[in-house]
Amino acid sequence: MRIIGSLFFGFLLAVGPALAQAPSASYQPVGTMSELMVSMVYPALNGILLQINRGGPTSEAEWTDLRRSAILLAESGNVLTMRSRGPEWSQASRALVNVGDAAYQAAVDGDVDALAALGEQLDASCVNCHEQYRLDVHPGAE
């Protein structure tokens, strides 16, 4: 009995964290992809780019807005990941998570230089996806 208990406990230690982070099987998309972009991705991205173009936040309110935008951008990447369309889609969605997280860390640290360094990564995260999935925006790409 002790061996079974030990095995069960070991199993829980091994898979417990993965089970806790597994997406809900009841995931139900609400908006269209366009609505998701307009409601989540664009406002978050624009909030971050605005601060980069202005040279970084200058008040606590602006740092707070930047943190909110960064979290929204990263989490929108997670939402897009749930709407997977294949490996390239997942990679592009993950890029939003990564750049949003980096912007959030820069905001938490109050690091204007780290924030400024994210400009190209922010742009690339959009362009790389749009070249594959928005041929109306990038008609030469396939």
Image (cartoon, rainbow, N blue to C red):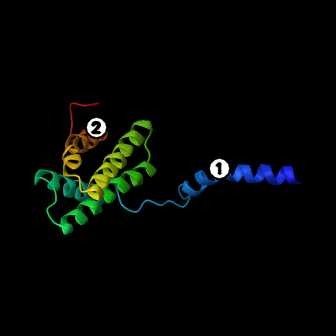
Dividing the picture into quarters, in which one does residue 25 lie? bottom right
Label 1 Cα crowd, 10 Å radius (few <14 / some 14-19 / many 20+) = few
Q: Residue at x 24, y 60 (%)?
A: 66
Q: Secondary structure at mark 1?
A: helix
Mark linked to residue 3: none
Dividing the picture into quarters, in which one does residue 31 lie? bottom left
**Residue for badge 1:** 15
Lower position in the chain sequence, tag 2 or tag 1: 1
Q: Residue furthest left?
A: 54
- What is the C-alpha distance between the residues marked 2 and 1? 34 Å
Q: Residue furthest right?
A: 1
Rendered location of residue 93, percent (x, y): 37, 45
Q: In this orientation, does residue 84 appear?
A: yes
Q: Secondary structure at mark 2?
A: helix
Rendered location of residue 41, percent (x, y): 28, 55
Rendered-image quadrant of the N terminus: bottom right
Q: Residue at x 58, y 57 (%)?
A: 20
Q: Nearer the viewer, residue 91 or 15?
A: 15
Rendered location of residue 107, percent (x, y): 26, 57
Q: Nearer the viewer, residue 125 or 98?
A: 98
Residue type, label 1:
Val
Q: Residue at x 41, y 52 (%)?
A: 78
- From the viewer's perspective, is the residue at label 2 or at label 1 nearer? 1
Label 2 Cα crowd, 10 Å radius (few <14 / some 14-19 / many 20+) = some
Mark linked to residue 128: 2
Q: In this orientation, does residue 34 appear?
A: no
Residue type, label 2:
Asn
Rendered location of residue 48, percent (x, y): 21, 55
Rendered-image quadrant of the C terminus: top left
Indicate left or right for 21 with 77 as reference: right
Dots 2, 1 in contact, CB < 8 A: no
Relative to residue 30, is residue 7 depicted above or below?
A: above
